[in-house]
Amino acid sequence: MILAVDGGGTKTVAIIVDENSKELLGTGISGPSNVRSVTAVTSRKNILKAIGNAEKMAGMVQISDSIYGIAGYGDSIAATEEIKSIIESVDKLSPANPVITNDGEAAAYLVTLGSDGIVTAVGTGSVGAYIKDGKLHRVGGWSYLTDDAASGYWIARKGLEMAEKSYDGFIDETILIQKFEDYFKLPLRDLVADMESHFNKRIMASLAMIVDNAAMEGDQISNDVLKLAAGEIEIMIDGMKQKFNGRIKTGCVGGVMQSSKIRNMLMDRYENLKIFYGYHVAIGNAMRLMNNRDESMRDSLVSQLDSTIPKLSRTEKDLLFIK
């Protein structure tokens, strides 16, 4: 049995796969494990919780190999050593030494299965990656202060910015003002002040759903925000495509892909675009650990993972922003 874990700034996903039967036996979700977002203690706790939830669903299984893709790994010497220490204290299930990588590599493998190709990972934050001649390259993902273009955080911030402009009478009216006020049960000025005083990147990113819902209800300002987000993703894709000649495998991964409007805009723009949700990334790690490049198996595991979602607890579903 294989244990594959994907840990980021919003959630941690663990899956257990039977490499012989090609079946996904267990799924577990918990909070963030990126050491840039939470403490090492919290990171370890959430990784263990996700694994425990996956084991509970899978039943009595014996893990033979494990792989962990944790955001922040490889970003700096300090972060890498901290994550190594966390995983060494966590991984007591597999007799072999665990493989440790970062979540961006897992996302890239999910899309390309190790072949040359490009991927944008757009969730709480955003980052791009491309594999050329077998070597992985990273672009974007500088920080939420200067970049994270098209991410949930970026969409939410832009939505709040447009709500403020509308409130001041600078642009057309938008239902975002009422939606934000209803969500926080505060007037717009008060909720903005409260968010500044108690800043939380994950909570901020979750507000992207409000923008998406408003766009689905026909709000033009919200729709324009989503168009801007899709445009930022296109900038990343087109920029990475310049590294290649001819057609290349291309995919988009992350929670932002749960927006049907953004998905449709991107699929209209790019032929054969592969789209996966954020919780699918752990499958990229599993496929990498098995050294498997079979697209049909990957797609089967994605379908199997989707079928486990109804079995998750309400808390786990909330972490995936699933109703």
Image (tube, helix red, strand yellow):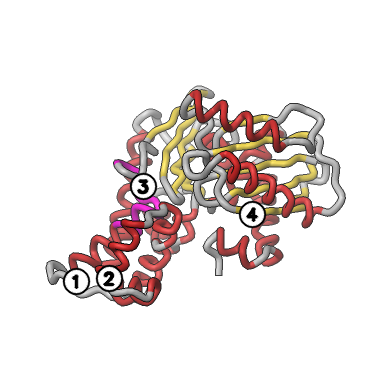
Q: Amino acid at mark 3?
A: Ile
Mark 4–mark 2 Cα distance, whole angstroms, equals 33 Å
Q: Which residue is mark 2?
A: 188
Report the mark closest to the observer, 4 or 2. Answer: 2
Q: Which residue is mark 3?
A: 233
Of residues 13 and 33, which is closer to you in this image? 33
Between marks 4 and 3 in the image, the one whose residue lies nearer the viewer: 4
| Picture residue at 29% right of the left edge, 63% below the top | 192
Q: Which residue is mark 4?
A: 29
Looking at marks 4 and 2 on the same chain, the residue that comes earlier in the sequence is marked by: 4
Total numbered badges shown on the rendered structure: 4
User: Does label 4 or label 3 sit earlier along the sequence?
Assistant: 4
Is label 1 in a helix, a strand or a loop? helix
Q: Secondary structure at mark 4?
A: strand
Q: Earlier in the sequence, mark 3 or mark 1?
A: 1
Q: Position of residue 39 (x, y in %)?
A: 53, 42
Instruction: Give neighbour class at mark 4: few <14, some 14-19, many 20+ (Cα, 10 Å).
Output: many
Looking at the rendering, the stretch of residues picked out in magenta corresponds to: 146-157
Q: Is residue 162 magenta?
A: no
Q: Nearer the viewer, mark 1 or mark 2?
A: 2
* Left or right: 251, with 284 as reference point: left
Residue shown at 74% from the left, 27% from the top? 97
Answer yes or no: do the residues labelled 1 and 2 have beta carbons within 8 Å?
A: yes
Question: Under tag 2, what secondary structure?
Answer: helix
* 275 relative to 183, above or below: above
Q: CA distance from mark 3 to mark 1?
A: 28 Å
Q: On the image, numbered disc 1 is attached to which residue?
A: 167
300 or 165, nearer to the observer: 165
